[in-house]
């Protein structure tokens, strides 16, 4: 992950799950009642609270109930939870505007008319906010979106019309108008000023409704201009709308929808990726363990795309599955979870072609610069695990991994499973997050270490192979930085040498934790070589952008757990055969530089969107003030 991508990932801390619709409605009514007590001045507190619920809470309830069916009837997809939360947010906006206006009115001679003028601005702002959200979430056209967006403001306008002197002030036309307005049914339905508090009935005039319509229209045009300006660079560079991204991102994190996958599918590119399968079976033919390495990145977050790939792969294996991290970055995220099925089919095809051998080599350790490589051969094939720990590093790019594997094959190996241990990083701080890219010094270090490992494996001691495994799903959860696969351990005994592979279902590790585990195992367990890996699962990153192993949990508990699992794995040692095979899968991934482009555009929206929104609001407010001046001068 690059610094730009980390800035985008960190935005997830601002997203939260939408509460259930009835919780939002209940809270809205409570706020309305409290506001009524402060805003109205009758002889009874309960009367004030009821008037607050009626004049402030009813528009919120109507918007919560009607927005979803109206929006869906027009082709949108707002849920009741989102619609209720939006209505509650808009109510808070109105209450805030009224509170500020009330304080200004109390300290100045502006009077009650100023408060109602501020209310008009608040209702217009509510309409603009709702229009922005409806267009972003439902992706309906501007004109169509105005219908569900106007429900809350429209309901408030109807209440003010009915419970004010407006109907009586309209009795200025000819006999036809006067007769129509004087009918008892019309008077009962459209004229109820006697039932309204004087704060409303005494200040509302017919012109106020015209001003509300004009100001709301100005705010709507401001929203449209704002979205057009923000959307243009997205359409030029990626061919998609920023609203598609916002809708998918909010829908995924807030309600777990798959809308984000639809967006990623639009920007995706076809790619061919190797899928390597290293299987261990008992002499009777039953599988004991399996290492599976698809050369893709398990992202982008949550269960979107390949975010939960390790778990999906593990459930398909007969034996205990190990799904470490491959040398691939975010450009090789799968665009949809459906692509995982292609990976599983390819892994199964590779597994069916495996030819087994009962001999293996002792493991070897090489180092070049910051890159360390642990290698072990099974026949003519080899497992190589790369780490830069104790130096911090993040994803190794696809091209670097392919080149390192090719370097190892050129030194005598047939097939290579090259694992990025992904076991030391310092989070999302700073400009350099340890990204290993082609042409960097670290990329050449990896190539050199891989070539030396292949050369040394050719001369390494060999013998029959014994394997022991152990697994604990743990009590930790994704919020703790641990995925559903928990912690898995494999102990390989060859030629009187024991090598331990530890796999934690998490996304990278806190600096120094890998060394603590290695030192603890060497001190307490009879082992010769140890490497600690993570799966890089992104189910732990749905809410927290940085949620590394050891960041939330007690590191001592993890070390103790690994020690126990190694003891269990050693007790489980038995003769096995091993074999490796690779197949290529054609999948749709984010594509070259698409992740960086997406992250850059999203970060630009966050950086420039506030300034642009401020400019739009300032311009619309200036015009609105002119409208108010003209209305009152008339």
Image: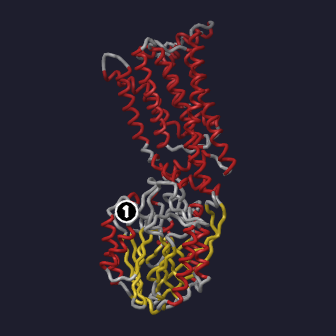
Asked whether 106 or 156 is in front, the reply is 106
152 w.r.t. 552: above or below: above
| Picture residue at 64% right of the left edge, 34% below the top | 225
Label 1 residue SS: loop
Asked whether 141 or 192 is in front, the reply is 141
| Picture residue at 47% right of the left edge, 55% below the top | 428
* Mark 1 crowdedness (10 Å alpha carbons): few <14, some 14-19, many ≥20: many
- Image x and y of residue 273, in percent: 61, 71
- Image x and y of residue 369, in percent: 51, 72
Residue 397, by quadrant, is bottom right
Q: How many marks?
A: 1
Asked whether 299 or 151 is in front, the reply is 299
| Picture residue at 58% right of the left edge, 49% below the top | 245
Q: Is residue 195 visible?
A: no
| The C terminus: image quadrant | top right
437 w.r.t. 80: above or below: below
Residue 348, by quadrant, is bottom right
In-image side of 527 versus 360 (left or right):
left
- Image x and y of residue 111, in percent: 44, 13
| Picture residue at 30% right of the left edge, 19% below the top | 44
Residue that lies at the very extreme toward the right in this rendered image: 236
Q: Label 1: which residue?
A: 550
- Image x and y of residue 75, in percent: 61, 43
Q: Is residue 247 visible?
A: yes
In-image side of 122 versus 564 (left or right):
right
Residue 228, by quadrant, is top right
Q: How is the image coloured?
A: secondary structure
């Amino acid at each position: 992950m690059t610094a730009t991508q980390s800035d985008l990932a960190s935005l997830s801390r601002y997203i939260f799950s939408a509460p259930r619709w009835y919780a939002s409605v209940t809270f809205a009514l409570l706020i309305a009642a409290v506001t009524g007590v402060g805003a109205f001045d009758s002889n009874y507190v309960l009367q004030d609270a009821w008037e607050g619920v009626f004049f402030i809470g009813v528009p919120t309830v109507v918007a919560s109930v009607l927005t979803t069916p109206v929006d869906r009837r027009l082709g949108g997809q707002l849920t009741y939870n989102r619609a209720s939360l939006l209505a509650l947010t808009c109510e808070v906006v109105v209450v805030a505007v009224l509170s500020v206006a009330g304080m200004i009115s109390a300290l100045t001679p502006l009077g009650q008319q100023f408060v109602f003028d501020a209310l008009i601005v608040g209702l217009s702002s509510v309409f603009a906010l709702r229009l922005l959200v409806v267009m972003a979430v439902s992706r309906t056209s501007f004109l169509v979106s105005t219908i569900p967006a106007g429900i809350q403001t429209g309901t408030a306008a109807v209440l003010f019309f009915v419970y004010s002197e407006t109907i009586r002030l309209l009795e200025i036309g000819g006999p036809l108008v006067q007769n129509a307005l004087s009918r008892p049914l019309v008077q009962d339905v459209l004229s109820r000023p006697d039932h309204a508090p004087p704060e409303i009935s005494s200040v509302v005039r017919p012109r106020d409704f015209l001003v509300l319509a004009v100001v709301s229209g100005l705010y709507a045009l401001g929203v449209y201009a704002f979205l057009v300006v923000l959307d243009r660079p997205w359409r030029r560079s990626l061919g998609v709308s920023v609203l598609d991204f916002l809708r998918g991102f909010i829908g995924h994190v807030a309600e777990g929808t798959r809308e984000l996958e639809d967006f990623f599918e639009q920007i995706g590119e076809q790619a061919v990726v190797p899928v390597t399968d290293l299987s261990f079976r008992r002499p009777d033919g039953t599988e004991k363990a399996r290492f599976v390495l698809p050369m893709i990145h398990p992202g982008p977050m949550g269960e979107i795309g390949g975010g939960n790939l390790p778990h999906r792969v593990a459930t398909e294996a007969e034996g205990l599955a190990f799904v470490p991290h491959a040398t691939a970055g975010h450009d090789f995220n799968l665009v949809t979870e459906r692509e995982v099925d292609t990976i599983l089919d390819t892994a199964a095809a590779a597994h069916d072609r495996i030819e087994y051998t009962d001999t293996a080599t002792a493991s070897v350790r090489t180092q070049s610069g910051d890159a360390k490589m642990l290698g072990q051969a099974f026949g003519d094939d080899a497992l190589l695990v790369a780490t830069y720990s104790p130096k911090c590093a993040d994803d190794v790019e696809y091209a670097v991994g392919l080149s390192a594997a090719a370097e190892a094959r050129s030194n005598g190996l047939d097939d290579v499973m090259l694992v990025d241990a992904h076991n030391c990083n310092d989070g999302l701080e700073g400009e350099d997050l340890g990204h290993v890219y082609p042409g960097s010094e670290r990329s050449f270090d990896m190539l050199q270490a891989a070539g030396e490992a292949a050369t040394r494996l050719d001369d390494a001691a060999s013998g029959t192979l014994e394997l022991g495994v152990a697994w604990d799903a743990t009590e930790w959860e994704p919020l703790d930085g641990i995925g559903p696969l928990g912690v898995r351990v494999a102990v390989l005994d060859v030629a009187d040498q024991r090598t331990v592979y530890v796999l934690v279902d998490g996304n990278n590790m806190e600096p120094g934790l890998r060394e603590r585990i290695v030192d603890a195992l060497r001190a307490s367990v009879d082992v010769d070589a140890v490497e600690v890996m993570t799966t890089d699962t992104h189910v732990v990153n749905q809410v927290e952008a940085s949620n590394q192993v050891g960041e939330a949990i007690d590191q001592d508990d993890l070390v103790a757990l690994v020690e126990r699992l190694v003891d269990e794995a050693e007790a489980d040692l038995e003769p096995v055969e091993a074999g490796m095979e690779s197949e290529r899968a054609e999948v749709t991934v984010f594509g070259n530089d698409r992740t960086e482009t997406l992250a850059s555009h999203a970060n630009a929206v966050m950086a420039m969107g506030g300034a642009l929104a401020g400019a739009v609001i300032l311009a619309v407010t200036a015009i609105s003030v002119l409208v108010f001046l003209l209305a009152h001068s008339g």
